[in-house]
Image (cartoon, grey):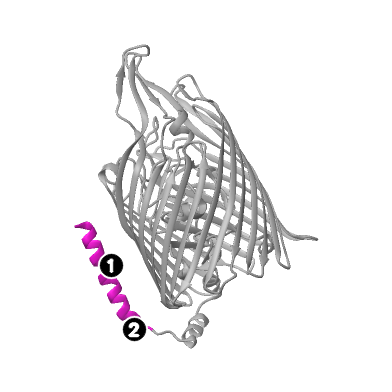
Amino acid sequence: MVIQRLVAFIFCYFVVMSEVNAESTLSAQNIIQALRALSLENLSEVKVLQVSSASRKSQSIMETAAASYVITQEDIRRAGISVLPEALRLVPGVQVARIDTNKWAISARGFNARFASKLLVMIDGRTIYTPLRAEVNWDAHNLLLEDVDRIEVIRGPGASLWGANAVNGIINIITKAACDTQGGLVSTTLGSGEEKGILGIRYGGKLPLGHYRLYSKLHVNDSALNEQGIEQEDDWHTKQIGLRVDQAVNRDAWDIETEYYETTYQRFDRKIQQNKQIKAKNAHILGRWKRELTDGSLQLQSYFTHTQRDDLLYSEKRDLYDIDFQHNIERWQTQSIIWGLGFRYTKDHIVGTPTFYYSPDRRTDNIFSAFVQHEWQFAEQWRLTMGTKLEHNDYTGFEVQPSVRLLWTPRDYYSVWAALSRAVKTPSRTGTDFHMQTGSPRMPIYIDGNTTLESETLLAYELGHRFQPNARFSFDLSLFLHKYRDVVTVGEPHFVAYPNRGLYYKNENALKGHSYGTEFAAKWQITSDFKVALNYSYLKEQDVLRAESISPKQQINAQIYWNINSQWSWNHNIYYTSKIPDTDIAAYTRWDTNMGWKISRDLNINVGIRNLLDKQHREFLPVSGIDALETPRSFYAKVQYRF
């Protein structure tokens, strides 16, 4: 019955839209008039509506056969975003829940959890997905947000190009080139409730071989509150410094970036009944070279990352090296081919406790990969894309992840796309090698990994539609059906009397099921000074999968940007999240508002309030051993000066 209703809705929707399109012929003159009505800020947005994460090459969103969304630098500034995870609330179909002062649960299309494991996150093409628990440590990537050019978000699988773990989505944070950040910048924020203080300093200049950008950031975040409004003394401190150098000469372009990052925060230690300071360090260096050819392009990228994290029960040291090559062939007018090779090496050392440890405590893993994608345009209006990723990993061996995508563009402003994809999520170090003992001395409980785990698999069916009759209005709708198999969960307990008496649990590939939903996004530049955006998402997860997910059924986000005059702007972001099924986390509505004052071309002041409607509200389940923490109302003032 559900599938029948979904098919009926799709049919009726496209019939109605076809009637609308018959009356919506857009001439070149109309486009020019619409562009003239846009402000300079909005004209820059029109230019950046290109995505590269969906196909490994730059193309407009209208030409992308995937559920794509772009967060621009303008969106980040207008929404008053101070930390990267909060920007993802703007994306339909992405679930964002704050756990405490420096932890977020973030996923796309469900399966949200503290250690969400089915979302591939990259910064400039460098993966920040950790092999330890198949998660993203968001506290270790507190970027200088003024350097972010855009954030590309692809909902749905992208494994045929990016490999295992790009299951439910891809997030690629793309920073600005050094040549676009010349001169000096000082950005400082003072606040209460979330950030206590932020200081960012950046300077860019020229070199004989190109341009450079040197930057540094200090961030001190306030403590989280429990349900009684009592501070938990879990202040979060970060500091980082980085350098980027890039150059473009004739057909060649290259860039090198390096960064050192350090974070400290407090966590409650139940053994000593007081807070303990936790530290994490991260350093990386990345190099990338690209050459434009007469019939395509070549690109070679390589990076090295060193991570060190000290938690309550373990410490982790990890080195990761990655090299990636791709060749784009645009030799034919109606066809193109992208292919590439990759290799990733990771080595770790994890020191635990007698009751919480990894065995072996040292491990080295390799991933070898190759991909190919063929795009064929036929009958002028149709484009068929087929490809696959071939990988070999040390957990499950050989994996194949194909996809087929079809795009129909009857008009320049109207497109329909469909996709069928297979993706896998490979086991993590925790899934196979983790061991923990808990419970009482009379009846101990043992939780163990499983070295025979298989990859979780997803078969995804997607259908989408985009409509952009002019430069002032855009509309995007996507529908999806995801079928999962071999999802890892803790299996049923069994009692052992000898030699180590107790209850034993083991990770198993025990779950299967499906989820379906829809995602909607619309943007309307009503006048050159007034813009409205509306996003909506609906998600239904089958009962057997819901046990592994803490995801709301419905989410709504409304953005209202108003330039009152040349100096003053007033911005609003309203978020609604429905009750999370099978939990006591209630629905909440969050309203963030801020006022901007552009004193001069180089000096800006912004004052804002977040969570205006609530003194505080809960967004996620409590961390083990810690009170349920809540997101408070917060205030901030930001001053930005360029020189």
User: Which residue does the numbered mark 2 point to in the structure image?
Assistant: 22
Above or below for 281 versus 516: above
Classify the position of the N terminus by image quarter: bottom left
State the image quarter where residue 477 is shown: bottom left
Residue 550 appears in view: no
Report the span colored magenta.
1-24
Q: Would you say the magenta stretch is mainly helix, strand or loop?
A: helix
Provide residue 182's location: percent of width, then percent of height.
70, 62
Instruction: Please tell me which residue lies in front, 121 or 591.
Output: 121
Q: Secondary structure at mark 2?
A: helix
Tag 1 residue = 10
Q: Amino acid at mark 1?
A: Ile
Farthest residue toward the right?
208
Identified at 37% across, 28% down, the residue is 506
Q: Is residue 414 left or right of residue 211?
A: left
Camera sees residue 108: yes
Quick check: is 626 in the magenta stretch?
no
- Identify the residue at horizontal 50%, vertical 52% (top origin): 389
